[in-house]
Image (spheres, grey):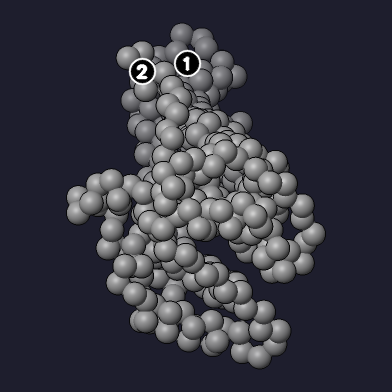
Amino acid sequence: MDENGNLKEIYEKRHRVYEFIRASDYERLTGQRVKVERGTYRMIQGADAEENLFFRFDDMDQVYLDQEDRFLPMEYAGNLTYQSLVQGRGFDNEARYVVNDRDYRVIAEGTAQFPRETQVFFDSRGGDDLAFSEELYRQFGELMAEDMKVCGAYDGWESLQEGEDYSYAGMAVYDPQNPVLAADWQYEPMFLPLEEAYSLASYAVYLLLFLYVAAVCLAAACIVGYARSQSVGLSSAQVFADLRRLGADRKYLRRLLKQQIQKVYVLPTIIGCGGIWLFELLLMKMNDGRMTGAEAETLLLCGGIALAAAALQYLLYRFSLRKVEGMLELKG
């Protein structure tokens, strides 16, 4: 950021370690026909991928060849969609590109600082996929080389620059015996059978915790609102009795009571239900400057929950009003 707090773009000639796949290998692996001209690249992204405030599809415009100490100019030529090859967000140190076979050979021969990687795909087609995935996850984790036990934010280029002071080296978090536990591991194997079987279990603790906190907070708001409405009735009993002696009719007194009880419920409900929904919208929009389909669905869900809480508050308001009306003998 500059001195005024505005974001500014800084061009870095050597920024991150990216992964490259030759076009012929991509075709063989995915079954997709793809043409990549020399000097260009195609980025691998998910079907709903979008650019955001921090990352663009064409961020890369050259590749550093350390063996020759020169840069190979590259130009963005569009995206390719194959979800199984997308790492994490698909940007920055998790980006993957498909390049022309000849360019791939130049890059492979011109770089030596970073290790080559092999990605293996399994299509078990029947059998006990879950047991197979659990056993493969266990063996992969237990036999992992020490220099591969790094967290998801690890980057080879940054590690070279900072040396022993690089904080992300050797910080992988995973349990080979329990793939359900959340991991922060750059080389964590991804198995759809495990994802499908344990997705709910992976978030159950967070889900139950937030449901518990939400229930406690909502119950507290209801109890406080009800108690406050009753105290309004008790403290106003003498005032209403005096107004009745001065000639105020029951209709006027009930309207006056409604206005007092509404103050107990309306403002907290607007702030609690409407305010938190707007805050969630602000978080999603300001995070990366865009709104994805999943985020829109989340907002709809949050909106439904907020409306349900508001409806509960309204029912409690009606109940409280009737109780206070009975207390002040205004029913009828």
The answer to whether residue 31 is left or right of residue 323 is: right
Which residue is more in the foreground, 146 or 323? 146
Compared to residue 190, the image places residue 276 above or below, namely above
Who's the residue at 28% across and 46% down the image? 161
Compared to residue 60, the image places residue 258 above or below, namely above
Callout 1 secondary element = helix
Q: Quadrant of residue 298?
A: top right
Which residue is more in the foreground, 327 or 267? 267
Disc sitting over residue 244 in the figure:
1
Q: Bin the neighbour count of mark 1 within 10 Å (Cα to Cα): few under 14, some 14-19, many 20 and up.
A: some
Disc sitting over residue 103 in the figure:
none
Q: Are marks 1 and 2 in contact (CB under 8 Å)?
A: no
In the rendered view of the protein, which quadrant contains the N terminus?
A: top left
Q: Position of residue 194 (x, y in %)?
A: 54, 75
Identify the residue under disc 2.
Answer: 2
Which residue is more in the foreground, 226 or 136? 136
Who's the residue at 42% across and 52% down the image? 67
